[in-house]
Amino acid sequence: MSTSLNRPPHEWLLYGAYGYTGRLLADEALRRGHRPILAGRDRARLEAFRDELPGSPLEIRAFALDDPDEIARGLEGVRAVLHAAGPFVRTGIPMMEGCLRAGADYLDITGEVPVFEAAFERSERAREAGVRLMPGVGMDVIPTDGIAALLAGAMPEATRLELALQSPGPPSAGTLQTVLEGIPGGLFVRRGGRLVRRNPGRREFRRRVDFGPVPGEGPMAGRLGGERSVAPYTWGDLATAWRTTGIDDITCYMATPAWQVRLLPVALPLLRGLLSLAPLRRAARRRVAAGPAGPDREARRTGRSRAWGRVEDGTGRAEEAVLELPEGYSFTALAGVRALEALLALEEEPVGALTPAGTFGVGWVLDLPGVEVVRTTAPILARPATS
């Protein structure tokens, strides 16, 4: 039975607005005619960022994520939150709890498995509150959730799913902070429907992936596509793709130079041990924070990324596909705002914890600007990139 949602006013709040990716989300939102409330911990930084933006001043709200009552006050009258302040493993759960109390939908741009699992653990409470929880509306997990759904539709009997990302550009400081947070947890995969820890040096992870045609000219010439070495990685798709497709065995990878892949079985346990020590973890955070914020405007404009997926059934029959999409941070900005728009456009159910492809449909990712299928063995309709 459908539920009529008792919604706050049609306004949304961008938390972490003055961060690297928050600024990109704010720019994209303004470009598409939105006027989000800008929020974060630091009022002075919010005011400075607001003054940089064109048009009449946007509302700002400064509040921390330590006190549930303070979060609830910060979300008063808000219909949805687009959360962009990581590491989300520390900030996502308090904001989700605030959204549940305030009756506001929650979206974020995380790729951290614990955040997704925390959302699904709160799914029943979200349904009771008429709230939607949708982590991962950026580079992870929108393209990979979409390709997983497309391939599962092409092979409904699939029992194994593999996903990989190729994003040649440098990571932002926020992304590196998230990586630092995740290293002590080690590598996870999904087997038999359960999240299990694995040694990255296992033979099963030694593989190369065909990311499709290699551009022969332009800024990405020789850098994108082709057969590449990959390293296993704990992506958020271990949580989302399982819910979207029902496939019980899932492994995620990231395109990685071969020499780094060879070092990973030794380096990862060493890093896990070092970063388990609080002083070293704090020093690493300071070092990352002192580095470049992220790719510059030109790198975001000209860069491209690829997402690969492969499904296999119990007989060994397999299907593969590769999507090409804009540079990762540019994609996160355009996809994050469009996911929020699509979620706000839903007047009735579904509510609870949701995945992008499971909510918006298996073909939704192909309608995003700059996304196209560049290689596939499956009967998926390849569409030209849109703008």
Image (cartoon, helix red, strand yellow):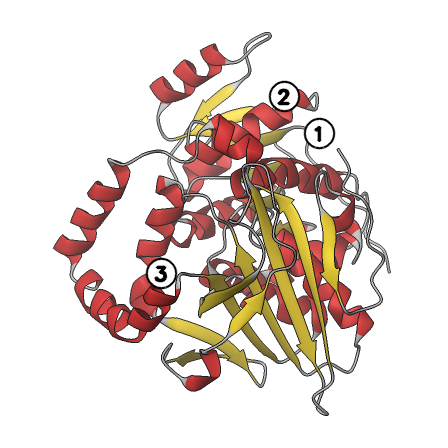
Q: What's under tag 1, amino acid-wise?
A: His
In the picture, which quadrant includes the C terminus?
top right
| Above/below status of 351 relative to 295 | below
| Above/below status of 181 relative to 29 | below
- Camera sees residue 7: yes
Q: Mark 1 highlights which residue?
A: 10
| Above/below status of 42 relative to 357 | above
Q: Mark 3 highlights which residue?
A: 182
SS class, disc 1 = loop
Query: Which of disc 2 and disc 1 is earlier in sequence?
Result: 1
The 10 Å Cα crowd at callout 1, few under 14, some 14 to 19, many 20 or more, is: few
SS class, disc 2 = helix
User: Is 30 on the left-hand or right-hand side of 362?
Assistant: left
Q: Mark 2 highlights which residue?
A: 30
Foreground residue among 262 and 153: 262
| Above/below status of 304 relative to 127 | above
User: Is 3 on the left-hand or right-hand side of 257?
Assistant: right
- Name, please, the residue furthest toward the top: 56
Query: Which of disc 3 and disc 2 is earlier in sequence?
Result: 2
Which residue does the image show at 66% across and 21% down from the upper left? 31
Which residue does the image show at 37% across and 69% down from the upper left? 261
Q: What's under tag 3, amino acid-wise?
A: Gly
x then y, percent, for residue 163: 59, 67
User: Is 38 on the left-hand or right-hand side of 362?
Assistant: left
- Is mark 1 in CB contact (under 8 Å) with mark 3? no
Mark 1 and mark 3: Cα distance apart in space: 35 Å
Residue 102 occupies quadrant? top right
